[in-house]
Image (tube, helix red, strand yellow):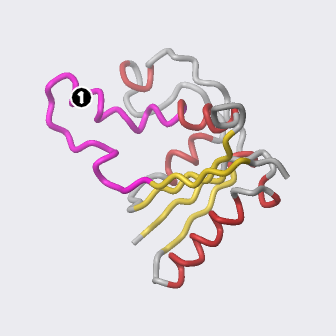
Amino acid sequence: MKALIVYGSPHGKMSATYRPGSNFAKGLKDEGWAIDELIINDVEIKHCLGCCACWLKTPGVCVQKDGMEDVIQRHQNIDLLVLAAPLYFYSVPGKVKDYWDRNMPLYLSESRKFAGQTDKSWTDSFKFLLISTRDFQ
């Protein structure tokens, strides 16, 4: 079993969300899971352009070239996606929003389902867990 733990606080390893996220990862490791950890703040992630090229012109591939190319690859063949992100002013930090928006190429199969095609959905292939804290130190 393989899990990707995504840490979304700009405080990185010093954040209130890193502690429970890393403890959860340790528990998974103890049970034999392969763990991949990603600190979003360490990755260059540009804003989504909303161009939908990743669905229409270059299916499954974003036209922007930045750190998300590697991040998208790290989402392949996972059984569990864990997002450990703080709650700031009724939402997630901006970089987490950019990360989520830029995952759009992974949802190509979702767009095909809406069009009546029967591809297996990317989100059907794994479980999702959110760990969220109020990140005031």
Q: Please indicate whether residue 69 sits to the left or right of residue 106 in the image.
A: right
Report crowding for label 1: few under 14, some 14 to 19, many 20 or more residues within 10 A (C-alpha).
Answer: some
Q: Which residue shows up at 67% across the image and 51% down it?
A: 133
User: Would you place residue 34 above or below residue 7 in this image?
Assistant: below
**Which residue in the rendered view is the most extreme toward the right?**
137
Task: Look at the image and tell me in which quarter the N terminus lies.
Answer: bottom left
Residue type pointed to by label 1: Arg
Percent x, y for residue 109? 29, 35
Does 12 lie within the magenta span?
A: no
Does 118 lie within the magenta span?
A: yes
Q: Please indicate whether residue 58 sits to the left or right of residue 135 in the image.
A: left
Image quadrant where residue 41 sits: top right
Q: Which residue shows up at 48% across the image and 64% down it?
A: 3
Percent x, y for residue 22? 65, 68
User: Would you place residue 43 above or below residue 31 in this image?
Assistant: above
Closest to the observer: 130 or 47?
A: 130
Image quadrant where residue 111 sits: top left
Percent x, y for residue 52? 44, 18
Percent x, y for residue 42? 75, 49
* Residue bounds of the magenta highlight: 102-128
Q: Which residue shows up at 72% across the image and 39% down it?
A: 44
Q: Which residue shows up at 52% across the image and 52% down it?
A: 130
User: Would you place residue 120 above or below residue 77 in this image?
Assistant: above
Does dot 1 land on a helix, a strand or a loop?
helix
User: Would you place residue 43 above or below residue 53 in this image?
Assistant: below
- What residue is shown with label 1? 112
Total number of numbered labels? 1
**Which residue in the rendered view is the most extreme toward the top?**
51
Image quadrant where residue 98 sits: top right
